[in-house]
């Protein structure tokens, strides 16, 4: 079997060399015709075209033949693409060189050989995958793809779970903080009650009430005098404003205005008030 493998390998190598020997003359002839009047340039271009086109053909062919079985599908497509692009270039060169039916026959035979190599590489790769799957089903490409999909889904679920847990943790911290504030507030209220302390808001309220009570302690005559003083300073002061300043109701202020008018101290003309001298 070893000898058979070596003979097949040697035969494939000879076929590749034969293909290059058949296609090289046309490649060199077409390339050299681009610069017929420049000998040095013609030689350089001929060598460059030979290396470029024939080299690409041999590179893709050799890589697909030697490594196609172990390569990935993308790698095999890459090798085959390089090989077939070079082949199409050689076919176009044959048509441009007017090689006729013989040239087309040579290129067609080469194309069949390249097609055989492409199909053989795919079949060998599939056989290798099936063999590996028989020994270990987890190495099958369908199993691997399904495993990757499950792993991707698990990673997404883990990420969602982690986000929800962080949100719950944040909510719990906020709830604990609120409960702690409420507990501290109740404790302070109890301390205030225990020590008979008056909150600041109550002290402010008491101060306001004291000022109001002081205003109410004015006698009627003092209230009348204060009303007259306010009107003397600003005749446009409204009864509501006077009521707030002297600590009386608005109706009481109207009564005061009536008394002051009866005493000829003021004169009311509609909404305006005139102070009598």
Image (cartoon, rainbow, N blue to C red):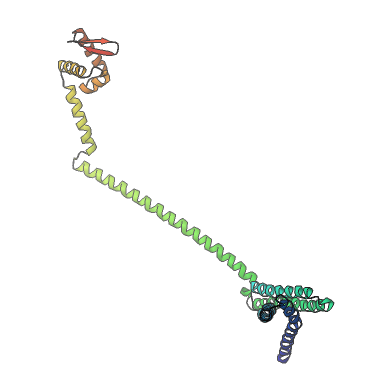
Q: Residue at x 32, y 50 (%)?
A: 180
Quadrant where the N terminus is found in the figure: bottom right
Quadrant where the C terminus is found in the figure: top left
Q: Which is nearer the eye, 230 or 162?
A: 230
> x, y (%) of residue 145?
62, 68
Q: Which is nearer the eye, 68 or 141?
A: 68
Name, please, the residue furthest toward the right: 101
Q: Is residue 72 above or below residue 168?
A: below
Q: Is residue 151 above or below residue 239?
A: below
Q: Is residue 276 left or right of residue 109?
A: left
Q: Residue at x 20, y 26 (%)?
A: 212
> x, y (%) of residue 35?
70, 76
Q: Is residue 260 above or below residue 5?
A: above
> x, y (%) of residue 216?
19, 22
Q: Which is nearer the eye, 210 or 264?
A: 264
> x, y (%) of residue 37?
70, 78
Can you tell which quarter of the image residue 272 is in?
top left
Name, please, the residue furthest toward the bottom: 3
């Amino acid at each position: 079997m070893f000898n058979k493998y070596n003979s097949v390998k040697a035969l494939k190598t000879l076929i590749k060399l034969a293909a290059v020997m058949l296609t090289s003359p046309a490649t060199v002839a077409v390339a050299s015709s681009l610069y017929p009047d420049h000998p040095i340039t013609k030689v350089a271009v001929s060598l460059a075209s030979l290396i470029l086109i024939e080299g690409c053909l041999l590179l893709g062919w050799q890589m697909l033949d030697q490594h196609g079985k172990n390569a990935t599908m993308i790698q095999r497509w890459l090798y085959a693409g390089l090989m077939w692009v070079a082949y199409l270039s050689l076919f176009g060169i044959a048509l441009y060189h007017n090689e006729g039916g013989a040239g087309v026959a040579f290129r067609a035979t080469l194309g069949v050989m390249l097609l055989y190599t492409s199909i053989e590489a795919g079949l060998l790769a599939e056989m290798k995958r099936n063999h590996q799957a028989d020994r270990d089903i987890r190495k099958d490409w369908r199993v691997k793809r399904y495993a990757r999909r499950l792993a991707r889904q698990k990673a997404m679920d883990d990420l969602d779970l982690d986000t929800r847990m962080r949100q719950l943790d944040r909510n719990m911290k906020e709830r604990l903080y609120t409960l702690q504030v409420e507990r501290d507030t109740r404790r302070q209220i109890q301390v205030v009650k225990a020590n008979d302390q008056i909150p600041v808001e109550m002290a402010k309220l008491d101060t306001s009430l004291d000022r109001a009570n002081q205003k109410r302690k004015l006698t009627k005559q003092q209230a009348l005098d204060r009303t007259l003083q306010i009107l003397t300073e600003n005749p446009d002061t409204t009864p509501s404003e006077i009521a707030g300043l002297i600590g009386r109701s608005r109706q009481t202020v109207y009564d005061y205005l009536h008394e002051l008018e009866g005493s000829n101290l003021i004169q009311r003309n509609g909404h305006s008030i005139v102070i009598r001298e």
